[in-house]
Amino acid sequence: MSALIYQFLPDLNWAGFYFMRGEGLVLGPFQGKTACVRIAVGRGVCGTAVERKESILVPDVHAFPGHIACDSASRSELVVPLIKDGRVLGVLDLDSPSPNRFDEEDREGCERFVQIYLQASEISL
């Protein structure tokens, strides 16, 4: 799924997953440069999306308090939590080198994509 998104969604420099392991997120399958391996819940955009249990669209990552810069080229970000049976299993994280790359249509489409993924997968806590 990360390869599919990376190939067909234009203007990305990173697309991948983090999965909940214990009290934090751990890097899963991804496309792009090497990324942060662990992210605490509540930290950065990914950890904040887990804490809030909602998608977060960030037009300019430099304006997001506590943003974790795994790739200094990233300028905007979209994070969609993987929620199954009310529990957050992880997140889909998309980064772009362009400011304001993501919009509400991207958010809605990625949320639908995540739901399809969750229905077809066997991931669980």
Image: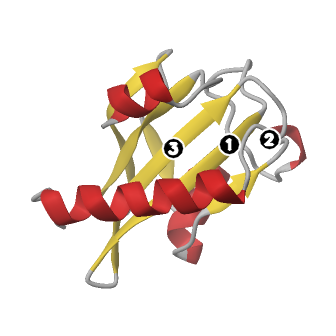
Q: Which residue is mark 1?
A: 77
Give me the C-alpha separation between circle 2 and circle 1: 7 Å
Q: Quadrant of the C terminus?
A: bottom left
Helix, strand or loop at disc 3? strand
Count neighbours of disc 2 (C-alpha within 10 A) and say few if under 14, some if 14 to 19, many if 20 or more: many
Count neighbours of disc 3 (C-alpha within 10 A) and say few if under 14, some if 14 to 19, many if 20 or more: many
Count neighbours of disc 1 (C-alpha within 10 A) and say few if under 14, some if 14 to 19, many if 20 or more: many
Q: In the image, is 53 to the left or to the right of 64?
A: left
Earlier sequence position, callout 3 versus callout 1: 1
Q: In the image, is 100 to the left or to the right of 39?
A: right
**Identity, as a three-letter code, of the amino acid under mark 3:** Asp
Q: Position of residue 24 (x, y in %)?
A: 40, 57
Q: Position of residue 42 (x, y in %)?
A: 60, 63
Earlier sequence position, callout 3 versus callout 2: 2
- The extreme right residue here reads 63
- The extreme bottom residue here reads 86
Q: Are marks 3 and 1 in contact (CB under 8 Å)?
A: yes
Q: In the image, is 60 to the left or to the right of 97?
A: right
Residue 61, labelled with which disc?
Answer: 2
Residue 93, labelled with which disc?
Answer: 3
Q: Position of residue 72 (x, y in %)?
A: 73, 20
Q: Residue at x 24, y 62 (%)?
A: 118
Helix, strand or loop at disc 1? strand
